[in-house]
Amino acid sequence: MKLKIAIQKSGRLNEDSVKLLKDCGIDLKNGVNKLKTESDNFPMEIYFLRDDDIPQYVEDAVADIGIVGENVLLEKNKKADIVEQLGFGKCRLSVAVGRSEKYEGVQFLEGKKIATTYPLLVQRFLDINKINAEIHEISGSVEIAPGIGLADAIVDLVSSGSTLFMNGLKEVETVLQSQAVLIRNSQLGAGQQEILDKLLFRIRAVKKARNNKYILLNAPNDQLEEIIRLLPGMKSPTVLPLADPGWSSVHSVLNENEFWDIIEKLKSAGAQGILVVPIEKMII
Ligand code: ATP
Ligand code: ZN
């Protein structure tokens, strides 16, 4: 019994998807077959596909699970369950208009032409906002549409905004926030579900580890209490005596979000020789 997973063949999600499997300890065979491979050490078969096709394959159970952008999943409107957000491929689907346009709200779009590769999501956005507009579905290079007179506005994926900027556009509304998600066929068999649970356990450990850092520092003993108070740790920090009798070594785990804030406080509390180390896996 094997779990079949569909991932993007090439493009923005390919590398991170492969890396996630690798970080989960799943080795992929380096075969000549570019469409399909398997793992030596985990009951998994990997299909490499265009991202647009992944929701359909998962709905049809050709693949049991898949990794795809939430934006693609919602646009394709296929039946598949989201089981986990994966924290990469982050972007947003946004409305953009010419930089010199006076944009004062969604009403701007009334009666206008909008170019996009996401007709379904755009129509839904227009319906929610009670706007009538004409959607022009195009298959790529959406950002040039206003410049060549094809549309008054576009709806496209944005991460840094530099593509919009280079094309004389400005971002004015967010239609959807997106990231890569793990999806599952909604009638997965018990055997496949069991393998998926194993995979999920590993994915969660990898995600946790990516969001946390291991920190080691030296603390003067008279400041130890205050420094320990600043550290959350998994249970409580580890404290070891140093050869120098006035000092201790303190070890703990810090979350990425509070990291810089806490480091600063530790320094002002007298901590020295602060080392920050990546964590490979984290199980709590
Ligand atoms: P394919 O050949 O598989 O159809 P594609 O050209 O449709 O690939 P990519 O450009 O590789 O797709 O993007 C894949 C996914 O990466 C997007 O659907 C989206 O979820 C995510 N993504 C993250 N940032 C961006 C960005 N700035 N622009 C486009 N996609 C992004
Ligand atoms: Zn695509």
Image (tube, rainbow, N blue to C red):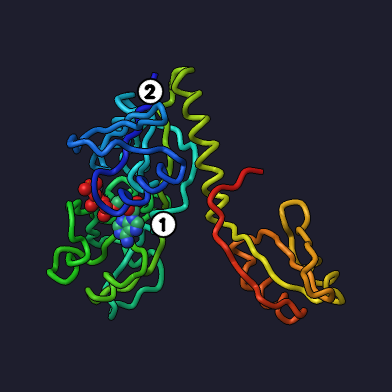
- Count of residue discs: 2
Residue 222 shown left or right of residue 12 in the figure: right
Disc 1 to disc 2, C-alpha distance: 29 Å
| Residue pictured at 22% horizontal, 58% vertical | 115
Is the CB–ligand 1 distance for label 1 below 8 Å? yes
Query: Where is mark 2, residue-wise?
Result: 2
Q: Earlier in the sequence, mark 1 or mark 2?
A: 2
Q: Quadrant of the N terminus?
A: top left
The type of residue carrying mark 1 is Lys
The residue shown at (17%, 67%) is: 144
Category of crowding for the residue at label 2, using alpha-carbon neighbours closer than 10 angstroms: few (below 14), some (14–19), many (at least 20): some
Identify the secondary structure beneath mark 1.
Answer: loop
Q: Position of residue 264 (x, y in %)?
A: 67, 78
Instruction: Give the quadrant of the C terminus.
Output: top right
Q: Is residue 10 left or right of residue 182?
A: left
Image position of 30 (left or right of 149): right
Give percent across and percent down for residue 95. Answer: 33, 63
Name the residue that disc number 1 marks. Answer: 90
Q: Nearer the viewer, residue 235 or 238?
A: 238
Out of 182 and 97, give the one closest to the viewer.
182
Q: Amino acid at mark 2?
A: Lys
